[in-house]
Amino acid sequence: MGLKGGSTQDEVMAVSLAKLGLRNGDVVADIGCGTGKVSIAASKHVGHVYAVDRRPEAIARARRQAADAGVLNIDFYEGDAVDFLMGVDALDCAFVGGSQRLQEVLDLLSERVRRTVVVNAVMVETVYEAIRSMKRLGIFREAVHLQVSRSAEIAGGIMFKPLNPVYIIVGGRIPCS
């Protein structure tokens, strides 16, 4: 059974990770980690990942997924993202896949993230809040609308079925290299 909100689509994850600009040795936070898919993918390119989700079932699933993948450089935190971030001094990058307390999360990330913050959103209200908050903080870089369609069989041929669009909002203090 899937988690509410679903797992990040592979194509969306690829663009989001590229926008993060991950580097060897980076310390990264995955806020609203859900299934842990983004955390696990990021862990292959960085030194350490903090995966945060308020839902116990999400953290349990993410832990299982990481164990199954043999990933050892992820610490999981079950609880509120704001509470977690209050105890963190510095991060290189952060991925935000959840929208709970987004303004407060972005306020804290703007003080703690050295390079890049990427927010994924499906709701227009979340897009608006992320852009508005990042602009207020002086860290907004760009917003990307990503529409993915996948092939599907129909009447002996192939059609493309669109998935729900995703918005990728990018911010940070130092430009991506």
Image: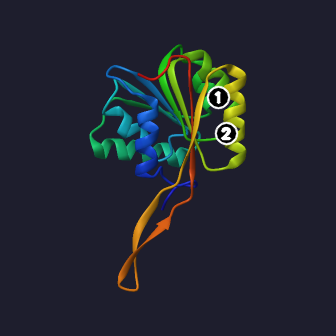
Q: Residues within 10 Å of mark 2 (few under 14, many from 20)?
A: some
Q: Residues within 10 Å of mark 1 (few under 14, many from 20)?
A: many
The amino acid type found where label 1 is placed reads: Val
In the rendered image of this protein, does residue 98 appear above or below residue 176?
A: below
Numbered circle sitting on residue 131 = none
Q: Horizontal placement of 133 versus 87: left or right?
A: right
105, 135: nearer the viewer? 135
In what element is the residue under mark 1? helix
Image coordinates of residue 127 in percent, x first then y, are 67, 41
| Residue located 58% across and 33% down the image | 142
Q: Residue furthest left?
A: 70
Q: Which residue is mark 1?
A: 105
Q: Horizontal placement of 162 versus 80: left or right?
A: left
Q: Quadrant of the C terminus?
A: top left
Q: Which residue is mark 2?
A: 100
Q: Earlier in the sequence, mark 2 or mark 1?
A: 2
67, 33: nearer the viewer? 33
83, 31: nearer the viewer? 31
Image coordinates of residue 139 in percent, x first then y, are 62, 22
In the rendered image of this protein, does residue 33 appear above or below residue 109?
A: below
Q: On the image, which quarter does residue 84 sit in? A: top right
The reply to whether residue 5 is visible in this rendering is yes
The amino acid type found where label 2 is placed reads: Gln
Residues tagged 2 and 1 counted as in contact (Cβ below 8 A):
yes
